[in-house]
Amino acid sequence: MNVLVVGGAGYIGSHCVRQLIAAGHRPVVLDNLVYGHRAALAPGVPLHEFNLGDEAAVERLLRAERIELVMHFAAYCYVGESVTDPLKYYFNNGVATLHLLRAMLAAGVKKFVFSSTCATYGVPAALPITEQSPQAPINPYGQTKLDVENALKAIARAHGLSFAAFRYFNAAGAAEDGAIGEDHSPETHLIPLAFDAAGGRRPQIEIFGTDYPTPDGTCLRDYVHVDDLSRAHIAVFPKLAAPGAALFYNLGTGRPTSNREVIRAVEKITGSKIKIVESPRRPGDPPALYADSTKAQRELGWTIKFPDIDSIVATAWKWHSAHPGGYGR
Ligand code: UDP
């Protein structure tokens, strides 16, 4: 299939682009390169560089490249920043996505794969989280993703759009060959920051909150390998053949890992001691988030190749040790 990958030069998008190629599809990337990296794309992958706000250009691109399905990864993803600068998130994650969807309808493209998030669940009443768990986000990041999910449902009903919204837990790790990996600027995510601290590029790592009602007092998250995530995006294609399909899947390993355990795993693989500073809680952080992903496993045949934090950070280490400065700017 001809697949437009919006945000395809970003972290999860670029891993998906590689898997699309490996599966025999033809990805075309649209990325404004605000956070994406040209170097995350193999030579020869078509890259179009503009904003979704240019709706007419999006429509032209969809027609010119004969796009059959759109994957949308382009979003801001900093929970903390979404609390301090909500408009940035409402415009980029919300309004920009609506432009994309309107351009798709205009061009007659009716298959859509959307990056949603476990942040749509807020503080879950019960764990692990299933797709039926109530969605009540506690930060604008999660709210904007939920807003798009709701828009998608209405568009599916009204116009026969078929979509899958994947609610990611914590994407982590890097391609097994170490060629591409995680490089955010600014970096706020725990695993890459821990590698920076282990490699001496940062003096220390702060743990945000050590008084949570969890076994070691730090937040619990469900880290899921970026290539495991990517495979689900392709596995869902046959299901999108039915007009109006509205599909929601959690993608996580189901295994809770505390912030301290993450840091220990990075220490173990790097052989370096990391200096930890215990800091106050970060606004917008639920204490524990981990997934029940049996629906994706059952319906998509999704399998988890990297089930635990050690196997995930081992791939991240391969990337970080070969590219200590990331892609370089
Ligand atoms: N975290 C931390 N120190 C950092 C960055 C993150 O303690 O320097 C914590 C954060 O508060 C959360 C967990 O690590 O409990 C995962 O955060 P991250 O930003 O990696 O992903 P998120 O869960 O926000 O998507």
Image: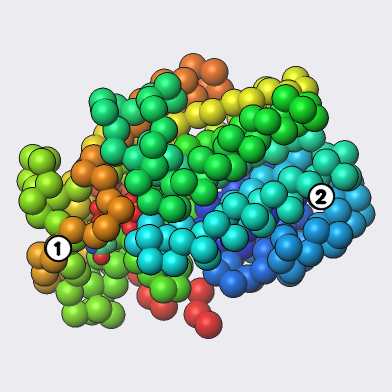
* CB under 8 Å between discs 1 and 2: no
* Tag 2: amino acid: Ala
Image quadrant in which you'd find residue 273: bottom left
Residue found at x 39% / y 37%: 136
Residue linked to disc 1 = 280
Residue linked to disc 2 = 103
* Tag 1: amino acid: Pro
Residue 3: give x, y in percent of width and height.
Answer: 75, 45
Mark 2 packing: few (<14 Cα in 10 Å), some, or many (20+)? many
- Residue 102 has which mark? none
Left or right: 84 in relation to 256: right
Image quadrant in which you'd find residue 307: top left
Say if residue 252 shows up in the picture. no
Residue found at x 64% / y 38%: 151
Residue found at x 26% / y 28%: 125
Q: Quadrant of the N terminus?
A: top right
Residue 279: give x, y in percent of width and height.
Answer: 13, 66
- Kindly state the secondary structure of the residue where label 2 is placed: helix
As drawn, 244 above or below 307: above
| The quarter of the picture showing ligand 1 | bottom left
Q: CA distance from mark 1 to mark 2?
A: 44 Å
Residue 96: give x, y in percent of width and height.
Answer: 66, 57
Say if residue 248 shows up in the picture. yes
